[in-house]
Image: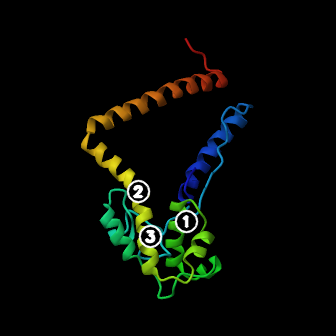
Amino acid sequence: PVGEDQKQHLELTRDVANTFNHRYGQEFFTIPEPLIMGEATRVMSLRDGTQKMSKSAESDMSRINLTDTAEVIADKIKRAKTDPLPLPETVEDLKDRPEADNLITIYAALSGTTKAAIVAEFAGKQWMEFKPKLSDLTVAKIGPITEKMRHLLAEPKEIDIILEAGAEKARSIAEVTLKNVKDVMGFWRA
């Protein structure tokens, strides 16, 4: 799976694989297909629902960081920009409400359901009823990641072990692939 903003990297990989396969007359490399899944393929800023959520944004309040505490996440969601209207009655009603659409999209993605289901559940309610539930859900989903990060940052040797294991696994796969590529290309090996 890739995010919408990573699609161009996958396109480059597809081009390289297609060129190699065509040049050497066989389907050696699998041509990767983009798999863009879920409701939140692009998460928008908490301060401006028309802008992508970004770690480089000036305001830390515009994003949820994986290192944010539960209290910070709750505060950011509480202060997230919304409009004065209650939650919409239908998904179509989100069309011209980017901030409302963003928060409902985040909720849908984190809960593994659809925007339609979220709208049906909260239709007509005020944001002050919705935001605490979104905060609780966000903390429940991100909290374990935050705890794992804190644990790893406190244990740098464990990070080194994980990195070395990953490098070894990648190395063993790459060696086989490189050998096979050389065979396809007709390189002679001693």
- The residue sitting at 43% across, 74% down in the picture is 131
Query: Tag 3: residue type?
Result: Lys
- The residue sitting at 31% across, 35% down in the picture is 158
Residue at far top of view: 190
Q: Regarding mark 2 in the picture, which secondary structure is present there?
A: helix
- The answer to whether marks 1 and 3 mark residues whose Cβ atoms lie closer than 8 Å is no
Residue 110 % position (x, y): 50, 61
Disc sitting over residue 108 in the figure: 1
Query: Tag 1: residue type?
Result: Ala
State how many labels appear: 3
Mark 3 — residue?
A: 133
Vertical position of residue 144 compared to residue 157: above or below: below
Specify whether residue 125 is in view.
yes
Disc sitting over residue 117 in the figure: none
Mark 2 — residue?
A: 142
- The residue sitting at 33% across, 72% down in the picture is 75
Query: Tag 2: residue type?
Result: Ile
Density class for disc 3 (Cα within 10 Å; few <14, some 14-19, many ≥20) is some
Residue at far left of view: 154
For the residues labelled 1 and 2, the Cα–Cα distance comes to: 15 Å
Mark found first going from the N terminus, 1 or 2: 1
- The answer to whether marks 1 and 2 mark residues whose Cβ atoms lie closer than 8 Å is no
Vertical position of residue 71 compared to residue 17: above or below: below
- The answer to whether marks 3 and 2 mark residues whose Cβ atoms lie closer than 8 Å is no
